[in-house]
Amino acid sequence: MKKQVEEVIAQIRPILQADGGDIQLVNVDETTGVVTVTLQGRCGGCPHAQMTLQAVVERKLKETVPGVTAVERA
């Protein structure tokens, strides 16, 4: 599961980098399906960061990686 999550994050990264941000994978809990990430750069302090996390990152991971149940910020 972790490798699949890393691949999806690699696809999402250019979108965030285009706005001066970035994303880093912290942990994948294969038991609960919770993925933990940190948003960096402009995304780290953006007031819309939670929306980006849910609308972009979590949605894409849930669609693509079986077993992912949630995405949280570290």
Image (cartoon, grey):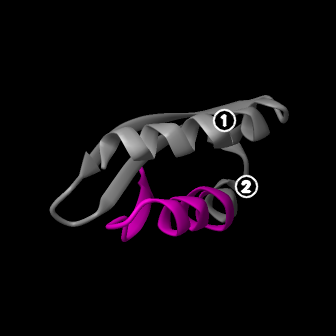
Earlier-in-chain disc, 1 versus 2:
1
Crowding at mark 2 (Cα within 10 Å: few <14, some 14-19, many 20+): few
Instruction: Pick whichever, 20 or 70, lies toward us.
Output: 70
Q: Residue at x 65, y 40 (%)?
A: 11
Q: Is residue 48 above or below residue 45?
A: below
Q: Residue furthest right?
A: 18
Mark 2 sits on what residue?
47
Q: Which residue is the extreme one toward the left? A: 31
Q: Which residues are magenta?
A: 53-74
Amino acid type of disc 2?
Pro
Question: Which quadrant: the C terminus?
Answer: top left
Coordinates of residue 35 in the picture (x, y in percent): 36, 53
Q: Is residue 44 above or below residue 31?
A: above
In terms of image quadrants, where is residue 34?
bottom left
Amino acid at circle 1: Arg
Instruction: Identify which residue is drawn at 74% across, 33% down.
Output: 14
Identified at 40% across, 67% down, the residue is 70
Which mark is drawn over residue 22?
none
Please give the residue where the numbered disc 1 appears in the rendered image.
13
State which mark lies toward you, 1 or 2: 1
Label 1: which secondary element: helix
Label 2 sits on a secondary structure element that is: loop
Residue shown at 69%/40% (left/top)? 43
Dot 1, crowdedness within 10 Å: few (<14), some or many (≥20)? some
